Amino acid sequence: MRRSPVAILIIVAIIIIANGLYIVDETKQVIITQFGKPVGEAITSAGLKFKLPFIQKANFFEKRVLEWDGEPKQIPTSDKKYLWVDTFARWRIDDPLLFFQTMRDENSAHGRLDDIISGTTRDIISLNLLIEVVRNSNRTMEFTEDYDPSLDEVIRAEIMHGRSGIADNILEQSKPAVAKYGIELIDVRIKRVNYIDDVRRKVFERMISERQKIAAKYRSAGQGKAAEVLGKMQRELDQIQSEAYRTAQEVKGRADAKATALYAKSYSKDPEFYRFMKTLETYEKTIKKDDTLILSTDGDYFKYLKKGK
């Protein structure tokens, strides 16, 4: 089936128009290139745009703020303390045409930011003391009563710039270096600072030793307090037992006196009956079921066992 010339022309026109139209999003900016070379100024406004079909190409770049996260670097401070320093930055493409001419894409820009920011960071930190990188201000530190800050050189030192000041200095010196690539460096911060393995191990050992000393002091104080409490408890116990024994003896004495009085009163009323009852009690206490007694019939002990005449 043959296509009519009109239909062919319509299809060709559609293809040409489709290739010539492109849409710029609010978050993008565009550089038009013709045979690989940029043509005209950067297009930063959003909307439907037109370019020459087939011979021109739209190259899109981010308009938003972008992130750069560097690799940790081992850097010596001016007092010869080696640190692992990890930095990050925020940047954006400020001049798309210059960026395209020098960088072409974001991957190349990240590589260049690595070189510039990491190098500047190394130069600046190597000119500062450890305390400047670790601390951020001269604010008064709070310690436990057992900690002696005079023993710590990091606590005693005075801060001139601090970590934030160093980061601001890195940003200030890196900005002009990246601007020639069409990049605006918005911010640079130190994300993390850490000792190298050997130094970190010594710091941890020192921290452990200090904590152990403090723990031993608390244990000693606790043991002394425990001995004091136990001694006080034993004294109170002895006092309570002494008072209880005295009270028991007083009660027992009064009971014995009352019993003796009752016995005397009973004896005075009927001495013979009293002797009889006491003798029966004696029998009960001294004569067991399987006992054999050899007694004289003339003894007083046997008199109530004699058969009455």
Image: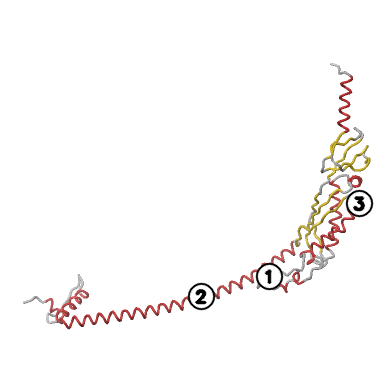
Badge 3 is on which residue?
180
Badge 2 is on which residue?
229
Q: Residue furthest top?
A: 1
Q: Are marks 3 and 2 in contact (CB under 8 Å)?
A: no
Q: Nearer the viewer, residue 107 or 251?
A: 251
- Mark 3 secondary-structure assignment: loop
Q: Is residue 245 above or below residue 7?
A: below
- Few, some or many residues within 10 Å of mark 2 (<14, 14–19, 20+): few
Q: Amino acid at mark 1?
A: Phe
Q: Residue at x 87, y 18 (%)?
A: 4
- Mark 1 secondary-structure assignment: loop
Q: Residue at x 88, y 38 (%)?
A: 58
- Mark 2 secondary-structure assignment: helix
Percent across and percent down for residue 258 are 26, 80
Position of 176 compared to 154: left or right?
A: right
Which comes before the other along the chain, label 3 or label 1?
1
- Few, some or many residues within 10 Å of mark 3 (<14, 14–19, 20+): few
Instruction: Look at the image and tell me in which quarter the C terminus lies.
Output: bottom left
Badge 1 is on which residue?
143
The nearer-to-camera label among 1 and 2 is 1
Q: CA distance from mark 1 to mark 2?
A: 30 Å
Q: Amino acid at mark 2?
A: Val
Q: CA distance from mark 3 to mark 2?
A: 77 Å
The nearer-to-camera label among 3 and 2 is 3
Q: Amino acid at mark 3?
A: Lys
Which comes before the other along the chain, label 3 or label 2?
3
Disc number for residue 30: none
